[in-house]
Amino acid sequence: MLQYDYDTWVMNALQEEPEDHLCSAESLARYLIRFNHDIAEIIGEHGEEAAGRAVWHVYGVLSGDISIALDDNDLETGLRVLESVKELYARGFASHCALAAPDHNTTRLDIACEMLWDMDTMQYAVEKHEELLQKAFEVLEFALFLPNQMCQSSAIHGLGHLAFTYPQPA
C-alpha cells in the first residue's frame, strides 16, 4: 500500500484535483487529528480557498477511507478524531468563515463549514457507536456556542440531520 507521510497527504488534499491517496487506517486517523489541529497554519500558509478544497476532500471524498479508519481503530481513536473537529471549528472555521449564502462552489471554506455534517464521514461516525454519537453532540454544542454565525449555522444544520434519527439528544 502506498503510504504518504502527513505533509504529502496535506499537500495532495490542497491541490485543485487531488489524487486518491492511501495510507493505513492508523495513519489516516493520526493525519486527520493533526489536520484539524493544524488548520489555522494550513490556512495561513496556503489560503482559505486551498484549505476549503482540502476540507471538502478530506471529509467528503475520503469519507470512505475515514469510515474504514474508524472501523479499524479502537473507539478511543475515533473519539479523538471527533474531538479534534472542535479544533477545526475553533482554529479554522471560527476565525476564517463568515455567514454566507450557500452556493455550489464547494471549494469555499465557509460552505465546507456549513456542510460538514452532510459529509459522509460525520454521518458514518455517529451511526457506528453510541460513544461517537455523544461526542458528535458535544462537538456540535461546542460549535453552537462559538462566537461565529457560520459555526452556529453549521451546528444547527448538523443537529437538524441528527434530529431525524436521534430526536431525544438533539
Image (cartoon, rainbow, N blue to C red):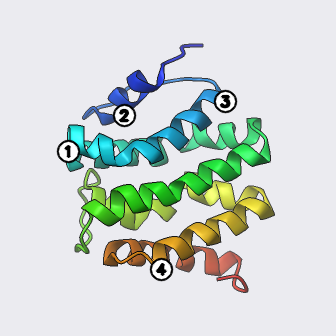
Which amino acid, mark 1?
Gly
Which amino acid, mark 4?
Ile
Q: Position of residue 66 (x, y in %)?
A: 60, 41
In the picture of the structure, the residue carrying the numbered disc 3 is: 26
Q: Position of residue 138 (x, y in %)?
A: 62, 70
Q: Depth-wise, is mark 3 or mark 2 nearer the camera?
A: 3
Q: Quadrant of residue 74?
A: top right
Residue 47 is labelled as 1
Residue 42, relative to residue 163: is it above or below? above
Q: Position of residue 103 (x, y in %)?
A: 24, 66
Say what secondary structure mark 1 lies in.
loop
Q: Which quarter of the image is occupied by the C terminus?
A: bottom right
Residue at x-position 78% and y-position 47%: 75
Q: Are marks 4 and 2 in contact (CB under 8 Å)?
A: no
Q: Depth-wise, is mark 4 or mark 3 nearer the camera?
A: 3
In the picture of the structure, the residue carrying the numbered disc 2 is: 13
Question: What distance separates the C-alpha of mark 4 from that of mark 3?
Answer: 31 Å
**Circle 3 residues within 10 Å: few <14, some 14–19, many ≥20:** some
Say what secondary structure mark 3 lies in.
helix
* Residue at the bottom extreme, as displayed: 168
Which amino acid, mark 2?
Ala
Q: Which quarter of the image is occupied by the N terminus?
A: top right
Say what secondary structure mark 4 lies in.
helix
Badge 4 or badge 1: first in the primary sequence = 1
Badge 1 or badge 3: first in the primary sequence = 3
Question: What distance separates the C-alpha of mark 3 from that of mark 2?
Answer: 18 Å
Q: Quick check: 54 left or right of 25?
A: left
Residue 24, relative to residue 91: is it above or below? above
